[in-house]
Image (cartoon, rainbow, N blue to C red):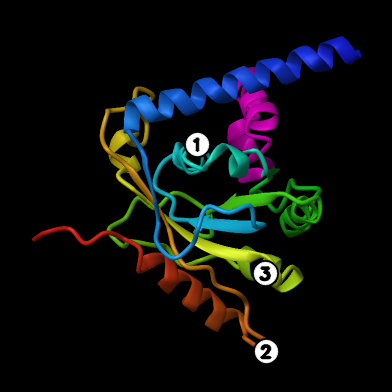
Amino acid sequence: MTLALRGLKALAALIAGQAIVLFARLVTAPRAVWAGSDPVPTQRIYFANHTSNGDFVLAWAVLPPALRERTRPVAASDYWLKSRLRAFAGRDVFRAVLIDRNPETRDEDPVEKMVAALNEGASLIIFPEGGRNMGPDPLLPFKTGIYHVAHRRPDVELVPTWIENLNAILPKGEVIPVPLLCTVTYGQAVHLKDGEDKDAFLGRAAQALRALKPERPE
């Protein structure tokens, strides 16, 4: 690819990113709530609940521009490489760390890919449940990836991030969002403790995220 084509592609990605942020704000009127963490340029892993295909788009879009520029969502390659348009959005607009969810076909370790992105200076948005939660429980059990990444990079802040209402805005199987108010709440950072085992850490991280879920009136 020539230098001119790379420049055009980068410009297209910048314009598309700005358009996505504007669209997200028009449809969801998202509100970022910093409840325990401040929007400062510290390297972080934002770990969020997962109920909609639009989750990482919103969690990325509501970040202040300076944080958004250095934050990369971790997403499924089978979804984001399904078409040229999705691939452009995933790779060039969001600069997502694309993970093959099928252990039988993957040729790269997901943990290694996430750690490599952190080592390059990026922050990450991840979904420790591993898949969309379509059931009645607030959270599915966490997969172990977040523990292994935290073990490799214990210096990086882990910020619980609760996304509220997006599953109602973009239900499964729908492509046209329903305008509703949406909040993204960023809680107090957690770290892997010295000597803390996997199960204890995953339980503590899940509780930190679950505690951010807004209380609904009876």
* Relative horizontal placement of residue 56, taking residue 211 as reference (left or right): right
**At 45% across and 42% down in the image, what residue appears?**
55
* Amino acid at circle 3: Ala
Tell which of 211 and 105 is nearer to you. 211
* Amino acid at circle 2: Gly
| Residue 80 included in the magenta stretch of the image | yes
Name the element at disc 3.
Answer: helix
Name the element at disc 1.
Answer: helix
Q: Quadrant of the C terminus?
A: bottom left
**At 91% across and 13% down in the image, what residue appears?**
2
* The magenta segment: 71-97
* Residue occupying the far right of the picture: 2
* Residue occupying the far left of the picture: 218
* Amino acid at circle 1: Ala
Q: How far is the residue under mark 3 from the one under mark 1?
A: 24 Å
Q: Earlier in the sequence, mark 2 or mark 1?
A: 1
Residue 198: give x, y in percent of width and height: 61, 79
Residue 5: give x, y in percent of width and height: 83, 11
Residue pointed to by mark 2: 195
Residue 215: give x, y in percent of width and height: 21, 62
Mark 2 vs mark 1: give the one in front: 1
Image height of 20 relative to 55, above or below: above
Residue pointed to by mark 1: 61
Residue pointed to by mark 3: 150
Q: Residue 76: which quarter of the image?
A: top right
| Residue 142 included in the magenta stretch of the image | no
* Relative horizontal placement of residue 205, taking residue 75 as reference (left or right): left
* Residue occupying the far bottom of the picture: 195
Tell which of 101 and 11 is nearer to you. 11
Residue 155 badge: none
